Image (cartoon, helix red, strand yellow):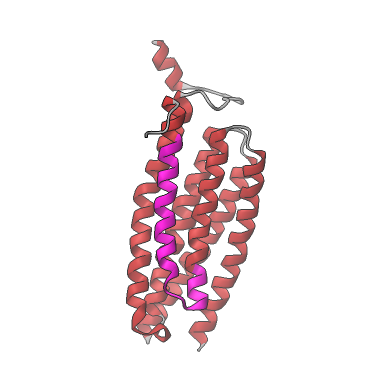
Amino acid sequence: MVLEDYVRIISGVSLAIYFTSILLYVVRLIKGPSIPDMVLAIDAITYSSITIFILLMLILNTPLLVTCAMVLSIFVYALNIYVAKYLESREMGE
Amino acid sequence: MISSLILIIIGGALVVIGSFCSLVAAIGILRLPNFFTRIHALTINIIGGTFTPLIGCGFITLGLETLGSERLFIAGGIFFTAILIVILGPAGSHALTRAAYRSKAVSFEPKFINQLEKEQRGD
């Protein structure tokens, strides 16, 4: 029982810190002067939300959230590659 | 019992390190002056803020016996996601930086030195 309380306290405090950092990333997403800055902010938001899904899974005991995290980690890579291809040759690969 | 205690304490320490790295990366992305310095803060977020707490959460789920036999499935998924991130994250951010440099979509100010430009000019 003590171990569960320890896990719950650490997960709760870390969740608060991750939500705070997502708020700071949103400021950069609105302020960003060019397209790569906005993409960078979206990357950071998605990486933080992967960790938030895993921490929520520890608190709520719902194993299906692991699948969402897996899909998100591939989505970020696809977004990076698409934006890089668009910036370098001015076309989306069709 | 002892092994689960050790696993949970190590996992909790890794999660705390990860949340600290995430806060540092957020301040860096908000305050650094240039795109090529902000991408450094993004990679702090990738490795320190996502990979480390995911490994920690995997250790925690392996140690928590109250989750039942589903915890092996959860830990396998978490470790797979962590390996995926540590391979694909730096590759993706490097591709983004290379494209932003070649297409001149970002400004260089303030610039102290640009060694690549000198080499391409042939000095």
Q: From this view, report whether residue A76 is shown above or below residue A3.
A: above
Horizontal arrangement in the rendering, residue A26 relative to residue A89 (left or right):
right
Quadrant housing residue B6: bottom left
Residue A65: x and y in percent read: 45, 68
Whether residue A57 is visible here, answered yes or no, is yes
Whether residue B17 is visible here, answered yes or no, is no
Q: Is residue A77 magenta?
A: yes
- Image quarter hosting the C terminus of chain B: top left
Q: Which residue is at 58% across, 72% downward?
A: A12
- Give the magenta range: A55-83
Residue A77: x and y in percent read: 41, 46
Q: From this view, report whether residue A89 is shown above or below residue B9.
A: above
Comparing B108 with A74, the one in front is A74
Residue B104: x and y in percent read: 51, 23
Q: Which residue is at 51% across, 39% downward?
A: B39
Q: Is residue A71 magenta?
A: yes
Q: From this view, report whether residue A1 is shown above or below residue B109.
A: below
Q: From this view, report whether residue A53 is shown above or below residue A42.
A: below
Quadrant housing residue A71: bottom left
Comparing A5 with A42, the one in front is A42
Q: Which residue is at 38% across, 66% downward?
A: B78
Residue reaching furthest to the bottom: A1
> What's the magenta bit mostly, secondary-structure-wise?
helix
Q: Which residue is at 54% across, 46% downward?
A: A42
Comparing B12 with A31, the one in front is A31
Comparing B11 with A30, the one in front is A30
